Each structure stands twice: as C-alpha cells, then as structure tokens.
Amino acid sequence: MTQRMQDPGRVQGLPITDHQGLQQALQEANLPSLLMVYVQLSGDEAMLDAFASHLQSIYTTEVSEVPEDLATDLRQRLFALLTAEEPINEPPLSTDFVRHMMSVSVGEAVDPELVPVLYDQMGFERPVPRKEQPGRPQPPADFRVLVIGGGMSGIAAGVKLGEAGYNYVIAEKNSELGGTWWENRYPGVGLDTPSHFYAYSFAQSPDWSHYHPKGPEIERYLLNVADQYGVRERVQFNTRVTALRWDEHASLWRVSLESQGEVSEESFQAVINGHGILNRWRMPDIPGLKDFQGVAMHTAGWDPEVDLKGKRVAIIGTGASGAQLAVAIAPEASQLTVFQRSRHWVMNNPEIHLGVTEGVKFALRHIPHYMEWFRFRVYWFTGDGLYGNVLRDPTWEDQSLSISAQNDGARQYALAYMQRKFADRPDLLEKMQPDYPIFGKRIVLDADGGWLDTLKQPNVSLETAGIERIVENGILTRDGRLIEVDVIALATGFELAPALGSMQVFGRGGVEAGAVWGRDEARSYLGIMVPGYPNFFMTQGPNSAPNHAAGVNMVIESQVNYIIEALDLLVARGAKALEPTEAAYREWNERVDSQMQNMVWLHPKASSYYLNSKGRNWVSCPFRLADYWSMVREPDPEALVLK
Ligand code: NAP
C-alpha cells in the first residue's frame, strides 16, 4: 500500500536565483544527500538505481568512487530542477521507496522501522504545536510543571512544554542556561557528535562553522533556541532544587529551592528532572592533592585567568576532555605531562577539525530537504549505524579482542590510525594500544594535528607508571620519579552516582529514592519514571544513555515527547497522579538486563564509568536509538497507574 509520508505539496524556496552560489553548493555538498534531494523532488528511481552500486558505507574497506560523469549528470539535473521557473510539486513517496532511498544514501540496508524515525528526527515533519491541535484538552493554568536544569534537556523540555500550553518553571543552578556547555570552558572544549545531528530536530541550523564546533558555539546555539522559544522568561537562575516531597493528600510535589542562601518552598503538579548526568566533578582519590602548592583545577571548573604560557602542566586523565585540553594547551606550556591510567581507543575522524564550507552552508540553507537528508546520514554513521559495534555476535569465534565482524572492523580502523600516527614512536603505541574490544568504553575521536600528534611534541610526555602521590611541587610516580609541575589539570571525569546527586526525592510514603537505589543501583521504567514517584520524570535516567554512539539529542527529545504525552494523558483523564506499574517497571528492567548481556560494555576486559560497583551497567541504553525512540513514542496506558 502506498502510504504518504507527508502531504504532497509545492516545494517552497524555489527557484534558486543565485546560480553561482548554487553551482558552488552542488560541487561542495555531500553527493549522496544531493542524490536524495533530487530523487525526492523528481521521483526519478532510475537515478537512485544508477548510484546504488557506487555508494557504500563509509566504514567499508572496499572503495568505489562514483563515476565523474554520473556525478556531473546528477549536479546538472539538480541545477535545472532547482532553477526552473515552473513550480515543483513533490511526487508522493511510499514508505518502501523512502526506505530504499535511505539504504542507497548510506550504502547499507536500513530497517523499515527507521522510516518514521527519519521523518520525525531528521526534521521532515513540522508538527503542529500541541496547543493548536484541535480536540486536545488544554492543561489547566494552575497545573504547574517544574523543570530542573536549563541545559540541553531543560531547554528542550521548556520549548515543548510551552508549545503544549503547560505552565512551567525552570530552576537553573547557574546564572545562565546551557548546562554542560556553559560549565565546560577548558581550552579546546568541543563536541564529538556532529553538530548537524546534535542540534535539536525542531531547531536545525545551517550556520554551524564546523562539523564539530567548539563549546562556545554550541552554547550560543542553545541560548538562541531558548530565546527564540521564550524559554528564558520561565527560568529562575541561581536556584538549586534540594528536595522534592510528594504530598499524597494534595497530589503535589512540595519542592525546596535554594537561591543565594535562602530556602523557599513551592508546589508543582509535576517535575521533570533534567539536571544532567555528567556534571558532578570526579576529583581523583590521589593522596596529597591538597598539599599541592600550584594551581589544580578540574576541566569543568576551569579558571581562564590562569596563564599557562611557559608553565609546566600536568593533565591527569586521557578521556575526551583530557585529549582536547592537551591539544589546546601543548603549544603554550613549556612542559606538558599527560598521566594515563587506562588506555582509551582513539579513532580517526577526519571531520573533527573541518570547517563547513560556504558551498555546503548554501546547500543547507537553500536546497530543499538537503539539511534533512544530510542529518540522516550523520545520524546513521555516528548513531545507529554503529550499533553492530557494541552488540556481541555469539558466532564470532575469538571474543578476546573483538565481539563481532563490525566491531573487529572498527578495531582495525582505529588501530591502523594509531599505528600510522606512531610509526615513528613505537613507545607510544605500546603505551596506548588498548587490549579490550573497541567501544568497551567511550572512544576518543581524533584527526591529523590532534591528540596523537600532540603526544609526539618534544615538550609533551605520556606517563603510564601510575601516580603514587601528589606533593607540594609536583607528582610522584609509582616508580619513584618526581615530575615538577606548576599546574595540574584534572581531566578525571564525573561522578554519575548517586543518580540524583545531592537532591533528595521523597515519593509515596516518604520513601527517598536514593535510599531505595543505594549509591549506584538506580533503575527506572524507560529511563524516565519510577513506581512510587508519581508525576516525577527524568531525562537521561538509568539505562537511557546512547553509549554505542552519538545521539543524546535524540534520546532527550524522545523522552521530552513521552513526558508531555504522559502529562496530556493525565490531563485528558482528569487524573492527578501517574506512575508506572510495578509489572511494567520489572519487565523493562528484565529487558534491559537481558539485552545488556550481549553488549560490549560487559566484556571482561572492559571497564568504564557506565558500570556500577557491582559491574552492572546502569547508565547505557542497550538498544538502538531508533528502537528506544519507538519504545517511548507514547505512553502505554496499560503500563501506568492513573489516579
Ligand atoms: P572520562 O571519559 O570519564 O575520562 C576521565 C579520565 O580520567 C579517564 O582517563 C580516567 O581513567 C581518568 N581518571 C579518573 N580518575 C583518575 C585517577 N584517580 N587517577 C588517574 N586517572 C584518573 O571524562 P571526560 O574526558 O571528562 O569525559 C566525560 C564524558 O563527556 C565522556 O562521555 C566523554 O566522551 C564526554 N565528552 C565529550 C566531549 C566531546 O563531545 N568532544 C568532550 C569532553 C567530554 P580511567 O579510564 O582509568 O577511569
């Protein structure tokens, strides 16, 4: 059956009159994405078939170039189409045809269930704001929702609550919005998810300067979205939520808020916790840190006033933050010593430092559907296309170094890069090559001129002997050497446990969530709700982090959508409290635990911050982004208790 994916209609923004700009765009833009635009506008299936055998997964070792005459033909056809005076009406496309397009675009078979995800998350659909949808019961004005945190989750929640007509307040502990991107100001801070995917699906931007921009640009983007949707007016800045108490009698959350030393109490019908999971600094338990007489600072508490020029600097930690910091400060430090505790896989991503050219920006701004199709490719190659890397193939014979053919391919790809970079420094390869399967912990992305090249600089050294203690003028290694330093940068990551930080949440019967969960045993229903805690919702809750790839943006949007659907259900039913059933909670956790057994994170040689003290992964989502998106698409009334 032919099913319309969207209403057919006249394509807006055509004809393109800047012919020179368009020619440049057609030369510089991504060819498979241009092909999708052409096929979507023309319905020309033959062109799709002509390209199919030449477009391959970017991770394949087989190289096949698109013949130049074919590429030229496509560009000419598109130019003619986009500059023609006659209006274009898009032909209807069936679900199967769209799936075929998606598969050709990425050179891999794409499952049919991804088609609705594509339409929602790539931005093809512009849904009517909820409050304008006919027949939907409007939330009462005295139904107040508290959002905790004004980072990426809190801003998305604000936008969508506003569009749904909810009366909401955001409590933000900082003096500005932006969360992670406001707090992390260390030199070199940047994004390893490509910006064209990381941006909200409902607020895509054609203006990114880089495929992986630096922190301030992302912070600016988030602030712009907040301003554009009027979120800022709803924020109480410098305000920290310290406790939530469910008032059974009134069906309200009584909330303790602390602002500049003053504690106040407010009441809300529902609470959305968006306080983030990677923002409580992990200070290393290395003896002597307090004795150090120089400057010691965590990457997330960076003091930009500290001048590193000519200083002897130590970085402790070699995750993404440590690697980015090292690249940025090595040129100015007189001596940089990087302390590695465990080995991280490093993967080449040539786009990591790449600027977006004017031609590509033109395509993103002016060529209809280019931005959406380009976003799909990015989602695939940095998101769900990577899922095979973390899923154990039981038929894969030797599981000691890799767990599947795809995982092994990724290992070879990463290893080849490390070997190439360290061809002249076998000592560094020996120190850094991991012995566990790739994706066992978060990968550090790199490119020429980046992290591995920095480690080869004459003023940089990599220490792996281990740290005995910190003394007043430096760091003593386990093999008895004193490395004198002026500054110690603690790139030691974040404490994820306890899941709710210092915030206390008392549910039905006054039971505190932290006491139930213990330090690091938090569980949830769908990463969003917990039985016994009515109208309390989480974003990025237990087992919902997309650790196979990029995609935190997609998880957050899916969760916000679910939460608003759940609130709408509450309002529509005239109920006061909603929570998951014990059965639904148990089933979800059984499903998570069962699937987790197949994931690389539980490999005996892998260790990461995803694991709790008992070795259980309580952080990662073991499903594809698209599967999770489908699971939380709308609340299942059978799984909920409404009173
Ligand atoms: P991280 O990934 O947790 O890395 C922390 C590093 O510090 C690890 O190398 C860890 O070693 C080391 N470490 C911790 N405690 C130590 C101790 N007591 N002694 C010696 N070494 C110690 O933290 P992160 O680099 O800040 O990254 C946090 C998260 O944010 C990650 O998911 C990361 O991918 C993400 N991030 C992303 C970007 C980006 O988008 N570009 C940038 C920064 C961060 P072990 O491995 O042995 O624990």
Image: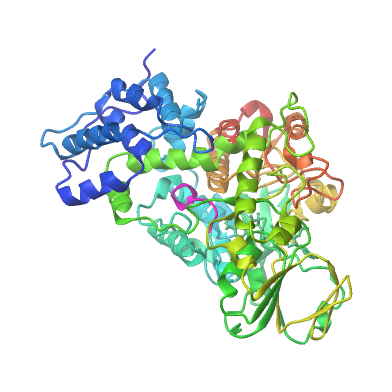
**Residue 480 is covered by the magenta coloring:** no
Relative depth, front residue between 454 and 167 = 454
Q: Quadrant of residue 474?
A: bottom right
| Residue placed most toward the observer, 232 or 123 | 123
Q: Position of residue 254 (x, y in %)?
A: 68, 57
Residue at left offset 57%, top offset 33%: 573
Q: At which x and y percent is residue 593?
A: 77, 34
Q: Quadrant of ligand 1?
A: bottom right
Q: Is residue 290 above or below residue 497?
A: below
How far across and how far down the image is residue 531, in percent? 74, 39
Outermost front residue: 424
Residue 490's place in the image compared with 558, above or below, is below
Q: Answer whether residue 192 is magenta in the image.
A: yes
* Relative horizontal placement of residue 13, taking residue 235 as reference (left or right): left
Q: For residue 488, what is the image quadrant?
A: bottom right
Is residue 520 shown left or right of residue 228? Answer: right
The quarter of the picture where the N terminus appears is top left
Q: Which residues are magenta?
A: 191-198
Asked where in the image residue 93 lies, by quadrant, the reply is top left
Asked if 76 appears above or below 310 in the picture, the reply is: above
Q: Nearer the viewer, residue 221 or 317?
A: 317
Residue appearing at x 15%, y 33% in the figure: 87
